[in-house]
Image: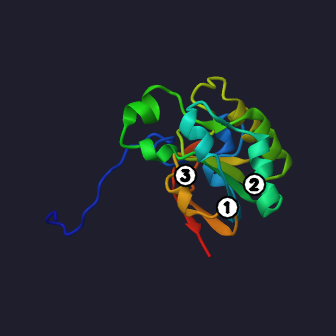
Amino acid sequence: MPADGYYARRIDVHEHTGTHFDAPAHFVEGGATVDEIAAGRLVVPVRVVDVSGQASDDPDYAVTVDDIRAMEREHGELMPGEALLALTGWDMHLEDPERYVGTMRFPGFSAEAADLVVDRGLAGIGIDTLSVDRGCDDTFPVHHRTLPAGLWQLEGLVGLDLIPAVGAMLVVGVPPVVGASGFPARVLALVP
């Protein structure tokens, strides 16, 4: 402890590092920045679509409309204002940087699935990989569909296997940094 009796540090961090939040401004000129997202849109019911089986055999797997509709048949249709998280199981590779990020091959959402969540009026989407777009999708089709529609995104999530497919509340703890296109976040699921 320093002589003045307190501990403090200065931190310099990229907006899109680790588990983080993407605001529409990340891909949309004039889009909402982190501080402009209402707090009520950051505490929402959450659904989880589990594609870990498919993604374990295919690092380029894209969450499909059929995956989402299968989840809906079992647990009810997605409702406006909810969030949808994709469980790919990719967070198990965090200790292997070459596999997790080095090859830029990891699962994401398909463009068609992005269109579906926009049509359903969701608050946001998230995934346990580096991006809601597959690593091989270098034109970012999901970003270009969801962010202009006002959805937010969560990337680099961990532990999605602990959240039920339906019934939990998502709490997105992101500081309202003025003008930020995104920011590291602490994301919690309140499980009944």
* Among the 4 quarters of the image, the one containing residue 171: bottom right
Mark 2 highlights which residue? Answer: 71
- Chain-order first, disc 1 or disc 3: 1
Mark 3 highlights which residue? Answer: 177
Please, what is the three-letter code of the amino acid marked with disc 1? Answer: Ala
How many neighbours does mark 2 have within 10 angstroms: few (below 14), some (14-19), or many (20 or more)?
Answer: some
Which of the two marks, 1 or 3, is nearer to us in this view?
1
- Secondary structure beneath dot 2 equals helix
Q: Quadrant of the N terminus?
A: bottom left
Note whether residue 179 is visible.
no
- Chain-order first, disc 3 or disc 2: 2
Q: Residue furthest bottom?
A: 192
Which of the two marks, 3 or 2, is nearer to us in this view?
2
Residue 41 percent across, percent down from the top left: 70, 60
At 59% from the left and 71% from the top, the residue drawn is 191
- Secondary structure beneath dot 3 equals loop
* Among the 4 quarters of the image, the one containing residue 168: bottom right
Q: Residue furthest left?
A: 3
Please, what is the three-letter code of the amino acid marked with disc 3? Answer: Val
Inter-mark Cα distance, 3 to 2: 35 Å
At 50% from the left and 56% from the top, the residue drawn is 159
Image height of 127 relative to 107, above or below = below
How many neighbours does mark 1 have within 10 angstroms: few (below 14), some (14-19), or many (20 or more)?
Answer: many
Task: Say which mark, if any, is on residue 165.
Answer: 1
Residue 54 percent across, percent down from the top left: 62, 40
